[in-house]
Image (cartoon, rainbow, N blue to C red):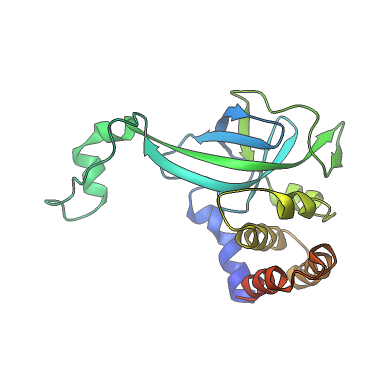
């Protein structure tokens, strides 16, 4: 488990992200979800990471890089290139033809510095800046695991087991003791999932890998 947690703690840096770095902005929002566009192509926040916009916290559950024009999908261009990077080097216009977007499930919000682990009263504002939460903010938010109910009940494109495990792995890196946090999370999941042993086993297996 230690190696896995070390890998997770380095994932944001490996993707070019820094704690509390402004990574994008809101392009659409509902009471339950934040949809954002990354400022850097191919560089969304990691799956399961905690982001924040306008006092609303979200857990990233999906990301995509696609053409700005649905009628003009990407085509292969690297047949004559030696390196993948050469494709964008020799076709610089490509960077302006695609965009990277991400979606985050709203799992809480803060008012006057107090954190609440339930849905915000209103959606995020369009064009609000989106930040990757710092380790301190992650630790503060995950001090209570009440947000797990929103993750477990959400309808998202990825399997909920993948999302919950990714979120807990990310959160564990911000705790004084990752193992103690994951043990507490495992107990909380066992209570919330009841007799759904298949889901519980799947999540716990992903936390151990």
Measured from the top left, where is residue 44 in percent x and y?
50, 44
- Front-most of 144 and 112? 144
Is residue 18 visible from the viewing direction of this image?
no
- Front-most of 30 and 94? 30
Measured from the top left, where is residue 3 in percent x and y?
59, 75
Question: For the point 65% across and 59% down, which residue is it?
Answer: 170
78 horizontally vs 22: left or right: left
Q: Quadrant of residue 26?
A: top right
Figure quadrant of the N terminus: bottom right
Figure quadrant of the C terminus: bottom right
Question: For the point 76% across and 61% down, which residue is it?
Answer: 175
54 horizontally vs 75: left or right: right
Q: How many marks?
A: 0
Measured from the top left, where is residue 141 in percent x and y?
79, 49
Furthest residue to the left? 80
Furthest residue to the front? 195
Question: For the point 53% across and 41% down, which residue is it?
Answer: 102
Question: For the point 75% across and 33% down, which residue is it?
Answer: 55
Measured from the top left, where is residue 29 in percent x and y?
63, 29
């Amino acid at each position: 488990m230690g190696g896995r947690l070390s890998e997770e703690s380095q994932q944001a840096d490996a993707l070019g992200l820094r704690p509390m770095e402004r990574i994008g902005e809101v392009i659409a929002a509902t009471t339950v979800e934040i949809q954002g566009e990354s400022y850097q192509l191919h560089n969304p926040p990691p799956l399961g990471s905690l982001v924040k916009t306008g006092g609303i916290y979200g857990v990233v559950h999906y990301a995509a890089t696609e053409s700005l024009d649905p009628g003009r999908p990407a085509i292969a261009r690297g047949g004559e290139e030696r390196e993948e990077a050469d494709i964008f080097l020799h076709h610089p216009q490509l960077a302006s033809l695609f965009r990277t977007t991400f979606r985050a499930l709203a799992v809480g919000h803060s008012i006057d510095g107090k954190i609440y682990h339930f849905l915000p009263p209103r959606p995020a504002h369009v064009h609000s800046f989106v930040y990757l939460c710092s380790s301190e903010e992650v630790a503060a938010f995950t001090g209570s695991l009440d947000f797990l109910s929103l993750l477990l009940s959400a309808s998202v494109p990825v399997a909920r087991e993948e999302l919950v495990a990714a979120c807990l792995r990310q959160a564990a890196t911000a705790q004084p003791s990752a193992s103690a946090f994951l043990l507490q999370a495992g107990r909380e999941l066992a209570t919330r999932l009841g007799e759904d042993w298949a889901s519980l086993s799947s999540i716990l297996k992903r936390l151990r890998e």
